[in-house]
Amino acid sequence: MPKGDWRFRIAHREALIGVALAAFNIIWWYGFAYTLGSKPPEEYTYILGFPAWFFWSCIAGLFVMIALVFLVVKFVLKDMPFDEEGRDDL
Amino acid sequence: MNWQVLIPLLLLLAVIFLIGIWSNRKLNQSTSFISDYFLGSRELGGLVLAMTMAATYGSASSFLGGPGAAYTIGLGWVLLAMTQVATGYFILLVLGKKFAIVTRRFQSVTLIDFLKTRYQSSTVVIISALSIVIFLFSAMAAQWIGGAHLIQSITGLPYLGALFLFAVAVLVYVIIGGFRAVAVTDATQGIIMFVGTFILLIAVVVAGGGIPSIMNDLTTINPNLVTPFGHDGQLNAAYVTSFWILVGVGVVGLPQVAVRAMSYRDARSMHRALMIGTVVVGVIMLNMHLIGVFARPVLPGIEVADQVIPMIALETLPPWVAGIVLAAPLAAMMSTVDSLLLLVSSSVVKDVYINYFRPQASRSHVKKVSIGFTAFLGIIVFLLSINPPDLLIYLNLFAFGGLEAAFIWPIIFGLYWKYANKHGAIASMLVGIVSYIAIYQYNETYGDLLGVHAVTIPVVLSCIAFIGVSLLFKQKPYYFEEALS
């Protein structure tokens, strides 16, 4: 096996993308929940029946993450073989 | 006995048995019992992979305990539950392709296999096997108790009878089918959960007179229910955010989840699983916990948290639909228990017994020992669950935190850091487990240290221990390319 397997470079990059996605997810989730949500409940605005903080943080946040994951899978992730020629898997 | 609810439930169990039998026939044809029984021969496709991860992860806590807590605490608990969306993409991306390539080359069948080959240390193997057995035992007991409670509230059977029914159903099919049966039925169960939560959510919204009206009622009951801070205003941001570690990104350290990240067929299965998994986990978590909150004005005064979901389903749905919908949490618990049983038994049989006592064991001997030990474990858990402790969700979360503190860094650094070595791994596991148990006990008595969940500090400490000790006993860098050739 050659040193510096090409598949590992791609795998490392994709792992970092996972970390970046999670970081973005946390910031989005925290940002909307604890800014809009910190007002007294009487001053809340409502979207589709939900308090605005909840709508943006949890509902919109979920759809944004789904969209990002789909984009990453479609445009960034690379196909690769997991097995080597001539070696039997278990 | 409520037969209209029970018949769809029993039909589900029958389908599961059939799938188990079908998988067993494939098992007899395969050449390697170990790899097939514990790993399904690494041929899971995208849908099955996503569903088996969602179903393993979506356990009693997300289907009974979680919505029950949301019922009491309000939207703040839904916010907390949404930290779990990350599991849908994070695990597969971070363990990802490197884990798949490396475990194939190592011919690892279990997480411990991987750690053993990477660190070349029997101490690592023993600590790992011990922590899996100890922590997963409490997780399993929690699931069995939840399952029995659920059957109890549907059928009216006494607790012991319900527990027995649940135990028999689980054991029969995990013993005959192994990992493939578990994974394939997980997929069926995942679909049931996904559809079931949608039906129930719609029924509850209709019963409550629409979302604006439900929010209005909640504000009237207690305005804190619609804030992120919980019914008593005590749910602080640091605590909720620390759940990103416990049930979000830290899930990478759970052996029952990690083993699934080595079981897929190819890169395309993984890509599909990423998309399906994110949708399924996110939607199920959002729906189930919203149902809990919405149930509050529709059916006030439920005392036992675990009964919120069964009661609201029986209240708002026609009986036969309720039967199908309630199959969802039952399905979740069964699949969690099955995978935990397999995992504990693989740790003992494969990682300890065969490694150290009978390396030359024949195929039929391994098969007998694996199946026999799985059954033995099931019976022990059954006996422990007869007289169970009350707080299901905490038992379950206790186990999660312990495993994460033990395994997260040995896995992550083992894969991605060339200077990771066995000294660091051992130090990290010991520091993680010991500090977790200590801080957990401290928090129970004095309130949360630094205001965060007990898992947070041990994860940080075990990270420091790993890096510090690895550098202290520095060895030459480790390259998978060299180790593999």
Image: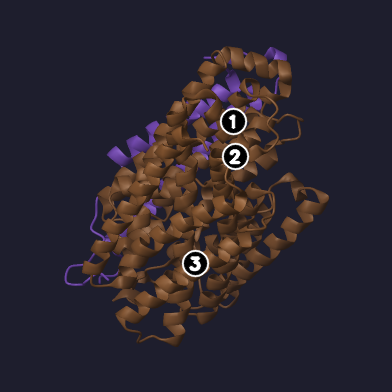
Chain colours: A purple, B brown
**What mark, if any, has residue B66 been given in the picture?**
2
Choose the circle earlier in sequence order: 3 or 1.
1
**Residue at (66%, 61%) from the top-left corner?**
B461
Amino acid type, mark 2: Gly
Q: Is residue B41 above or below residue B369?
A: above
Q: Amino acid at mark 3?
A: Val
Residue A1 is situated, as x and y percent measured from the top left of the image, at 25, 72
**Badges 2 and 1: C-beta atoms under 8 Å apart?**
yes
Tag 3 and tag 1 share a subunit: yes
Q: Is residue B28 above or below residue A28?
A: below
Q: CA distance from mark 2 to mark 3?
A: 25 Å
Residue B67 in view here: yes
Seen from the viewer's position, the closer of residues B207 and A36 is B207
Question: Which residue is at the far front?
Answer: B1
Left-right relation of B484 to B258 = left
B95 horizontally vs B220: left or right: left
Mark 2 falls within which chain?
Answer: B
Element on which disc 2 rests = helix
Where is mark 3, residue-wise?
A: B344
Q: Contact, CB < 8 Å: mark 3 with mark 1? A: no
Measure the C-alpha gap from mark 2 to mark 1.
Answer: 8 Å
- Earlier in the chain: of badge 2 and badge 1, it is 2
Say which chain tag 1 marks.
B
Q: Residue at x 63, y 47 (%)?
A: B393
Secondary structure under the numbered disc 1 in the rendered image: helix
Return the x and y of residue B229 as percentages of the image width and height. 70, 30
Q: Position of residue B215 (x, y in %)?
A: 62, 17
Classify mark 3: helix, strand or loop.
helix
| Res B292 label | 1
**Where, by quadrant of the figure, is residue B193 drawn?**
top left
Residue A65 visible somewhere in the drawing: no
